[in-house]
Amino acid sequence: MPGSALNKKITVTLPALPPLEEFLPYLEQIWESRWLTNNGPFHELLESKLAEYLGVDHISLFSNGTLALICALRALDIQGEVITTPYSFVATTHALWWNNITPVFVDIEPEYLNLDPDKIESAITERTSAILPVHVYGNPCKMELIEAIAGKHHLKVIYDAAHAFGVKIRDRSILDLGDLSVLSFHATKVFTTLEGGAIVSHSAEMKHHIDNLRNFGFQDETVVEEPGINAKMNEMQSAFGLLQLKYVDLYIAERKRITNIYRKLLRDISGLQFLYDMEGVHHNYAYFPILIDENFFGMSRDELYLKLQQNNIYSRRYFYPLICDLTMYNSLVSAASTNMPVAIRLAKQVICLPIYPDLELEIVKEIAELIKNYQR
Ligand SMILES: *Cc1c(COP(=O)(O)O)cnc(C)c1O
């Protein structure tokens, strides 16, 4: 009987934790040095190791991804209007709100659910200062097209790369593009520092500016250059990150293995679609989204979501509701539903199935079996 093996709650993700005994030596060092935060030795080491791992020149660690987004916009002095996607985690748009910037929502493309470059230009006004796209599920946006538009209209580009840890196109990090890219190392992400985040920048001057912003604007002991914030990553987070980094390739390989099993088991189901790898892209398999077309599947996305829950499978509807439908944003002109046909349609169809490095094969099979049985 389907579902019978699922006697424990299966969540959409679980953080991958390295063996506890491997974390203890880091803690001993922290106890020894009594250096807990403010550019401690683990913080400095993690910055250099991450820059090397990701293949970028400059990275600044943050206490979380949302503060990194807020500071990235501040570092470039972005004002007025910013073009962004409604199909993301709320923090993308909230970061604009915290900077007093008006979000301008633009629809997504149906293939990878990223901001649609074809719809950007008509949303540009004389108040537009930047584009804030998201690499949703870690799939790179159409960066060349976005940056051509940005160049033509003298706009900055800040990528919300919260899902895109380690993603490369033909061996080049996608974090290398745009003016800035922002990562999240939240507990639910591919690489985690418990809470955490980072900004990737492209010059030593910009990194210096960002580093000051995240530490109250302190230039040195007595000089405060600008009204910065406290968004520093501490030594516990940094140490955890250093240990995670040793395992992250393994974690991504496991995610890839699970993705391919899902793809094999869920192939050729009427009304069910999933996303494929992009050519030349090294993916991180952060999520496994499927799209349910009720007319062909025979059951709505929400019905399937609830049925799975009844079987102890806690999938998530990332990204539903759309950000533009939240009460604090839905009165914006750009939030009008007529402006958002693709995002509205796909937000009603999407379910992210459980995926994390040690998700058992048996459970993946069970989930696929349940879904197949619901199709009619
Ligand atoms: C997780 C996430 C963030 C926020 O990061 P935190 O580290 O949780 O603050 C921002 N944008 C997107 C797309 C995310 O998924």
Image (cartoon, rainbow, N blue to C red):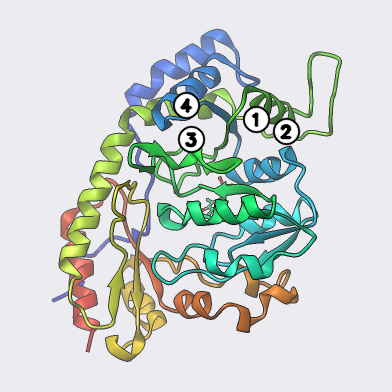
| Depth order, front residue of 328/6 | 328
The answer to whether residue 184 is left or right of residue 275 is: right
In the rendered image, is residue 5 in sight? no
Mark 1 neighbour class, 10 Å CA radius: few under 14, some 14 to 19, many 20 or more: many
Which tag, 3 or 1, sits closer to the chain's start? Answer: 3
Sequence-first tag of 2 and 4:
4
Corner quadrant of residue 372? bottom left
- Name the image quarter holding residue 7: bottom left
Please identify, in this view, whether the residue under mark 3 or under mark 4 is nearer the observer: 4
Residue 41 placement, left or right of 327: left
Name the residue at 15% across, 59% down: 362
Quadrant (top left, top right, bottom left, bottom right) of the C terminus: bottom left
Nearer the observer: mark 2 or 4; the answer is 4
Q: Which residue is mark 1?
A: 232
Under mark 2, the amino acid is Asn
- The residue carrying mark 2 is 230
